[in-house]
Amino acid sequence: MKTLFPIRYLMLEFNILQSRETLDRLKHRESFAIGEKKENIFWSLELQGNMEYSFASDQANSRQPFCSTATMNKIVFTPPEKTLENQSFRIACVSFKIQYEYKKEEYLKQKIQYEYKKEEYLKQKIQYEYKKEEYLKQKIQYEYKKEEYLKQKIQYEYKKEEYLKQKIQYEYKKEEYLKQKIQYEYKKEEYLKQKIQYEYKKEGYLKQKIQYEYKKEEYLKQKIQY
């Protein structure tokens, strides 16, 4: 028997709406399987040949288990008291103890923990991305203000440089003006010196001329007296 069941205690049941002839054909088949698909897992019970096939009726409000024995090698169903054509029969089997459900339960717990941690991680990631975004906004604002400050600083330095250039030109022109003024004062001083010397010489000449005239006059006086 092959069993692939994801629960500890499994009851697989289905209704066969067939005639006794169909059931007889089933008995002579080498094998047949019953099962259902749920959550993408196929549960199957395969009954191999040389096993007893007997069915329990769902009549008369019977609430007795339909499986009398269930081992790993064969399944024996309680024989029905009577069988009728087109009768609804139920094949049921219970007590398949497996550990897959336990593992599935553990897996689900781990999956829940994983999803919780994943959710917490996503929350933290969202918070991190939000803080990162806020940081980038502040950084952009800081860089913008820094850029504006540098622009203003460059403009200030440019104006300062222009002012210094103008000041240097002014100082140069002032220096040139002072040089020219000094040269003018020097030339003026030289001119005054020459003028003084000229006046001095002129005065000396006049003194000599006066003395000459005086002596000439004295001479004429003496000549007249004589």
Image (cartoon, rainbow, N blue to C red):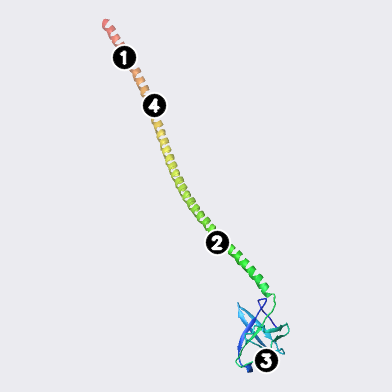
| Disc 4 from disc 2: Cα separation | 91 Å
* Circles 4 and 2: CB atoms closer than 8 Å: no
**In this rendering, position of residue 164 left or right of residue 210:** right
- Which of the marked residues, 1 or 4, is nearer the chain's N terminus? 4
| Disc 1 from disc 4: Cα separation | 30 Å
| Disc 3 from disc 4: Cα separation | 151 Å
**In this rendering, position of residue 55 left or right of residue 122:** right
Pick the residue in front: 217 or 82.
82
Q: Which mark is residue 126?
A: 2
**Mark 3 sits on what residue?**
27
* Circles 2 and 1: CB atoms closer than 8 Å: no
* Residue type for callout 4: Glu
* Circles 1 and 4: CB atoms closer than 8 Å: no
Which class describes the residues within 10 Å of circle 4: few (<14), some (14-19), or many (20+)? few
* Residue type for callout 3: Lys
* Mark in front: 2 vs 1: 2
* Mark in front: 1 vs 3: 3
* Mark in front: 4 vs 2: 2
**Mark 4 sits on what residue?**
189
- Secondary structure, mark 2, is helix
Q: Position of residue 63 (x, y in %)?
A: 64, 83
Which class describes the residues within 10 Å of circle 2: few (<14), some (14-19), or many (20+)? few
Q: Look at the image and tell me in which quarter the N terminus lies.
A: bottom right
Q: Residue furthest top?
A: 226
**Mark 1 sits on what residue?**
210
Pick the residue in front: 33 or 199.
33
| Disc 3 from disc 2: Cα separation | 63 Å
- Secondary structure, mark 4, is helix
Q: Position of residue 67 (x, y in %)?
A: 68, 84
